[in-house]
Structure formats: structure tokens, C-alpha cells
Amino acid sequence: MSKNAMLAEPGFVLAERDLQPLAIGAALLGTGGGGNPYIGMLRTRELIRGGAAVRIVPLDAMPDGAMVGRVGGIGAPLIGVEKIAQGGELLRALRAMEEAAGARMSALIAAEIGGANAMAPIIVAAQAGLPVLDGDGMGRAFPELQMTTFAIYGNRGTMTALADDKGNVVVLRHLVDAIAQERFARTVAVAMGAGAGAAGAPLPMAFVRQVAIPGTVSQALTIGRIVLDARGRRQDVVGRMVEETGATHFFTGKITDVRRDLLGGFVRGHVDLTGIDRWAGAAARIAIQNENLVLWIDGAAAAMVPDLIINLAADSGEPITTEMLRYGQRVAVIGLPAHPLLKTGPALAVVGPQAFGYAELEFRPLPDRRLPA
Amino acid sequence: MSKNAMLAEPGFVLAERDLQPLAIGAALLGTGGGGNPYIGMLRTRELIRGGAAVRIVPLDAMPDGAMVGRVGGIGAPLIGVEKIAQGGELLRALRAMEEAAGARMSALIAAEIGGANAMAPIIVAAQAGLPVLDGDGMGRAFPELQMTTFAIYGNRGTMTALADDKGNVVVLRHLVDAIAQERFARTVAVAMGAGAGAAGAPLPMAFVRQVAIPGTVSQALTIGRIVLDARGRRQDVVGRMVEETGATHFFTGKITDVRRDLLGGFVRGHVDLTGIDRWAGAAARIAIQNENLVLWIDGAAAAMVPDLIINLAADSGEPITTEMLRYGQRVAVIGLPAHPLLKTGPALAVVGPQAFGYAELEFRPLPDRRLPA
């Protein structure tokens, strides 16, 4: 990038009016999981009203050697929803990580743009006066900590700092692998009462720039603005989404069955739909592990991870999370293509359909009409 | 201390032949709890046979500003027995603590001389080439981490490093209080598979010298030597113990009932005895929370915490831990006075009978004939 671009202050400052569309867009990118960004949105609004300014900057705005921090809420398995308890716990986790790693962070990035954790770096950025990178490690939500492009493309660092709203701070200093990291982090989060903030080890900007999914904060904002604008104009929200985002409208139907079990700390199950409107007579099933994993229409796989399978309320365009699915709901199912970084061989080995146990499914990508940046 | 004493190298180097008496003495000072020092003894023997030398030094051997490390095994509540899994986990916990605290340890001390944790600092000392202080934080065993003279006399530091035999290392960086410390440490220990090594924050020697129970490594060794010597000469072990240590022989009897429940992570219950020999016709009961808490003879309290109530096999003088109590066993019950540091007002508030829930019991100390140093 040119020096002038630096001087002109790249990116944009998040305004209060951006927060609602950002929260809606993040929830949609959560593909059923990732938790609800609503409480995080309220925290951010308080901070902005109190005078904090958060700048969202593109991945090329920071120098190679700058250190990037990752923060997010981490929930107990039986709660499942990532929860931001109070806000201060995220900042304390970040400071504990800086101390443990002996490095100061120059910017923050979301590990997961889909759901509640989209707001986590924004809250901490407002508290610490840091910029937030326009990007994340998933481009959506996934059920496990290690399912990020940071891990997929070589980051083996497992050091993690955890803090709660009471003042307890725990640093997972060395862990033998990502499985141990996930297990210890969840265990400590449970002891913290399910409202723990987590911070990952610093990543150099040169690495983040190569492997982060770019532009996802802007994408969430754009998608959320489309929903709100269509709703305000009493337009067909799903129609506007399809028209403006390159999404595929797969199905609209009524929920006839929901199976949801807590297994191994995850919500697993499926939802069955019977078609309405132009899908009358057809049937759909969506398999779930926190997030929507696979969509079948009349028995044929129509979309699958890592592509995004998104359920919206057919009338309002409101995102429907896995916890909220219930019998009789009218749901529109749309698909968005995952970013190319999630569709390489190494990525599919971690977040493709076979990685989630669908041995018979070979990944077939949705048409790659890219999301608007 | 004089400079000459320093030059003469104070204390003594632990010999292989010292290990068995040390383990027996430590088990006796465990007053039924603290776990079995046997495995730790075998680890130490290996290290000494491999050429390691461990010097036990008196509390006045180190300068005021030297930093003292505490290490010990920490068990899962449902296992209850502090377990040294492999030895390396204790050293890794110590190194993690040094890194987190930004200080190098100059010596090690046992938090608890009673039971398995008597061996923990000796194992690490052999690995790290450090001296072990002749003393500890309890002079016996107690069921909770915070029941040490270090905590009783003002150390509020809660930082704790934990490591397992696989290579996972977790640092409890800040905890709001000792209760949170205990809870997080147990939780992480459980995630580590019940074989975790723990290291406490460094304590300055000037503080340790004032509040540690002095001479307890030597005491364990002396007591263990008495048992082994009496056994070798086919003498009455209990009689020799009473004669040489100032112990009170309270009771000898047969166990008629053992109640032992796992409640809140502790073994709680009692054991009933019916007298034999000169106690024929009398009955005794001992209340237990991991350790022996109170001894009643014919309904009258005869000894209570923090004084030491010790059960030995009536014939061999072998220490009988809480887990090993069983119907029909012939047991000699002896008492040893606790060190004066455990009998002050602040200490009794933490380790006196009322602190263990016996509201009706006012502490009445055993005659203070001191243990041989």
C-alpha cells in the first residue's frame, strides 16, 4: 500500500447506526450458530456513546511486523452460546496474553465473524483504543476453536488467556495440541461460570494478511443493511438478499420436525421442512452441529460446509439460530459461497463435509459469486 | 548466621538409605491423609542412583531475599490421593511459575510434609539442582491448599502453575481469592487426568523463615528411623515412638465400624474402635476429613486438630491412611502436639476444630513436648 493511504487513515470508523446492521449480518453469517450478537452490540453502543471510536481497517493497512490479537467469548458446552458477560473480561484476557507472550497488540481481529464473537474485538478495541481488522478466521461460524484459517494454514500456537467478570485470569501456557487447547479452554470456561473471555496468542500481521478471510466485517455490515433496508421498505427481504449478495435461494418451507441433542458439548441434530410456495410438494432436511452443516432437498445434497447455509424467517428476514428453530416456523433457506481460502484441500480436511462425519459427501461448491465487500 | 556456616554447607545431603524412613515418617505426619509417599520415594531413589544430590538445609541457611518455590502434586477430588505421575510435571510447573513470576527459585519447600507431597520438592530439587528447606507449611497434612502457615500468616498470592505428564502447562495468573484458587486448581487438575504437578508463587526467604514449620523434613526422617529400627529389633514400635518422640499413646483397639463418604471432593466420615489390652471395655471414635480431625474416648474429646492424631498398625507400626481403614484392623492411636505456629488465634481460625465444623469444641492442646528435630 502507498504511504498516502496510511496517512489518509484507511478503513472507516464504526458509527452507532452501523451496529444494528452489523449484528444482523454477523448473526446471518453464523449459519445458525455462533450465538447472538445482540448483547455485544449493546455493550459496543454504550462504549461508542461514551466517546470511544473504533476504526475498521483493511488487512493491508498495518505493517508486516504488527502483532494482531484475537479475542472472543467462550462458553460452557452445556450453554453452547458464546456469551459476553461484561466486556471487561475480554480486555483482561487480552492484557494477560500480552503479558504472557511479551508482546503488545497493534490491532485486533475476530476469530469468528459469525455470531456473537463478531462483536468481541470491537468491544475490546473500544476499550483499548486499537483498530479492528476487516476480516476474520472463519468467514462464518464453526463449532470448534481450531477451525480457523489461522490454524488451517499453519498456526500451531496454542497459548490462550482466559478471564472472567470476577477478576480470575488463567493462562493456558503450553498445550500439546489444538484438541488439548479446546478441552482445557472449555474446562476453565465452565469453572469461570460460562462467561469467560478468551485471547489467542499474537499473530504477526504478515501471516494474518495471507490467511484471514478478508472484508468480513464489511460484508456483515452490508448484509445487515440490506435486511434492514428491505424491511423498512416492506420489500421481500429474501428476494433482496438473493439479488444483492449473490446468494442462492434453495428452499422455503414450514418446519415439520426438529431434532436437537446435546452430544459431546455440541448441539447436534437436524431440522425437516416441507415446502411451501414454489417448493410445495418438496421436502428438505438440514443437518446441524451448532451450525447448519448440510442441506438436502428431496434427498439430494444441495449445499454443504464450508459453504454457508442460512435460515431466515420467511417474512422478516430475521436470522434463525439453531436454538430458536421450532415446529411450524416458516423458514427461507439460502446459500452463500464460502471464501476460496476455506475450499482448498487443507481447509476441506478440517471444515469440509467429511471432516464433520459425512464420509459419503464429496464437497461440491456453490457457484462462486462473491459476497459484496 | 555466620559466614562460616555458609561455607561449611549447612544441612545434610539425603542418602538413598534415608528415603524409606523419610517416606514412613511423612506418611505418619499425614495423620491419615496426604497420600502415600511410596511412588515419590521410588522416583527420588532413581534420581539419587543416577547421581543427583539433594541437600536439605535449615531455614536459616539462605539469605533473606532468596526466592523459595513450592511444588506438590494435586489430585482430582474423586481420586483424593495426591499423585506424582511422572516427576517431570513438577519441574515443568516450577519452570512455568518462574517464567510467570519473573523470578528464579533458590530453594524449594514442601507445602505439606504429611504424605506424598513431602517427596515433591525433593524430586524437583534433584532435577533442578536446588536445595530443599528443612520445613514445610503445615507440619502435617491438611485437606485444603490454603491451610498452610504461608496463607495463615499473610501470603495472599494465588498465582499457581500446573503441568501434567503430557506437556500441558496452565498458569492461574490472578485469582480473586484462595477459594477460587482451590477451585480452579482442582478443575485444571481433573482436566489433566488427576496427575498434575503444581507450583506456587515464589515466597521470599525472609517470610518463609518466619512462618514455615521448621525442621519437619528432619522430623519425618527421625520418626521413620525409629519405626524401622524398632521393627528391625522386633521391639514394640508404638512404645518406641512414645518413648522417643514425646507422643501420647491414646488408645489401642479393633475397628468396629468405618464410615467414609466422598462429600464435596473430600473423604468425610468416622471410624469406631473398641479397646483391647489396657483399653478393654473402652470405645473410641475418630472423625475424618481426609485427615484425622478429632479423637473421642468414651465420648470425651481427647485430641483434636491441629494436633496430630496418628493411626498405626498395632503390630508393625505401619501408618494407616484413611483409605486403608477396614473392619477388624488392630490400630494404635497416638497423638503428637502441633507446632506453636499452628496454635495461635489466626491459625486456629483456619485449622482449629471449629474451622472444621466442630462448633462445640474449644481447642485443648496436647502437652507440648516437642518432636525431636
Image (cartoon, coloured by chain):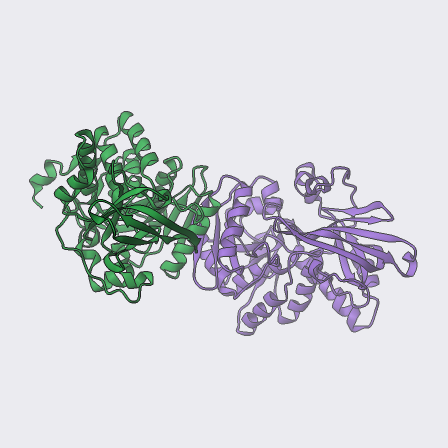
Chain colours: A purple, B green
Give the image location of residue B258, x and y in percent.
Answer: 38, 49
Can residue B33 be spotted in the picture? Answer: no
Give the image location of residue B259, x and y in percent.
Answer: 39, 51
Give the image location of residue A282, x and y in percent.
Answer: 90, 53
Left or right of residue A211, residue A158 in this image: left
Question: Is A43 situated above or below A274?
Answer: below
In the foreground, B159 or A10: B159
| Direction top: furthest residue | B50
In the foreground, B320 or B115: B320
Give the image location of residue B76, x and y in percent.
Answer: 43, 47
What residue do we see at 33% from left, 40% from top? B36
What residue do we see at 28% from left, 58% from top? B351
What residue do we see at 53% from left, 72% from top? A51
In the foreground, B284 or B207: B284
Locate the C terminus of chain B by quadrant.
top left
Question: Is A276 situated above or below A178?
Answer: below
Q: Quadrant of residue B7?
A: top left
Can residue A314 be spotted in the picture? Answer: yes
